[in-house]
Image (cartoon, rainbow, N blue to C red):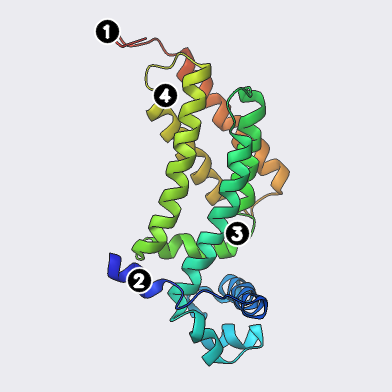
Amino acid sequence: MAASTAAQNPRKQPQQRRSRATVDKILAAAAQVLAEEGDGATTDRIAARAGVSIGSLYQYFPNKGALMLELARRHMAAAGEVLDHVLRLGRPRSVWLPEAVAAVAALHEDGDLHRVLYDHAASTPALAEAFEQTNEALRSRVEELLRAETDLADPGTTAQVLVALVESLTHRLVGTTDADTLAREVTRAANAYLNAACASPRPVGASP
């Protein structure tokens, strides 16, 4: 797995402003072409869309997988920053839950691109790891909030199910309705699950 990840990491990190701008152009083009063409996207098409030579692209990214991995990492980092702000201790569920759902929905905003990345994660360990790290960070933060504001017998499992519910519903429904409706309905489902979990009696012998 380490070898696979290394093969898909960027070849070099841009140090100068011009180099960073070139990498940003390549990634923006990659996002567009992947969203439009899916598996049919090629590095040649991405380079052409970015207005750079294929040699310039390969200077930074050895293959299409490396481009996809960097796109995923950037998306996850942006989502992580938002979720760190949203999921702060001391905020009631009525505030943090809809904001967290909206943040997850924003991550899926470009539905076609997200589906390509998500589908490739099944056969690309490095890409799967990028998604898993974000989901685990989200689960951990949600568990912390649930421990602070509920009397759940197993907040860890509840947090895991809640994150999976929000992620899977959003992934399935993005593009089928507008963003506001999507966020509202996923929040409704998440609240229904949490209300049922909180109302369930604590198993006999469970620690308080």
The alpha-carbon separation of the residues under discs 3 and 4 comes to 31 Å
Q: Quadrant of residue 32?
A: bottom right
* Farthest front residue in view: 16
Task: Tell me which label, 1 or 2, sits earlier in the chain.
Answer: 2
Task: Tell me which label, 3 or 4, sits earlier in the chain.
Answer: 3
Q: Which mark is residue 205?
A: 1
Q: Nearer the viewer, mark 4 or mark 2?
A: 2
Say which element carries label 3.
helix
Q: Kindly identify the residue that appears in the image at 42 percent across and 71 percent down.
A: 9
- Up-down relation of residue 129 to residue 186 (above or below): below
Task: Tell me which label, 3 or 1, sits earlier in the chain.
Answer: 3
Task: Tell me which label, 4 or 1, sits earlier in the chain.
Answer: 4
Determine crowd level at label 4: few under 14, some 14-19, many 20+ residues with C-alpha closer than 10 A: many
Task: Tell me which label, 4 or 2, sits earlier in the chain.
Answer: 2
The amino acid beneath tag 2 is Ala
Name the foreground residue: 5 vs 206.
Answer: 5
Determine crowd level at label 2: few under 14, some 14-19, many 20+ residues with C-alpha closer than 10 A: few
The alpha-carbon separation of the residues under discs 4 and 1 comes to 16 Å
Lateral position of residue 8 relative to residue 29, left or right: left
Say which element carries label 2.
helix
Say which element carries label 1.
loop
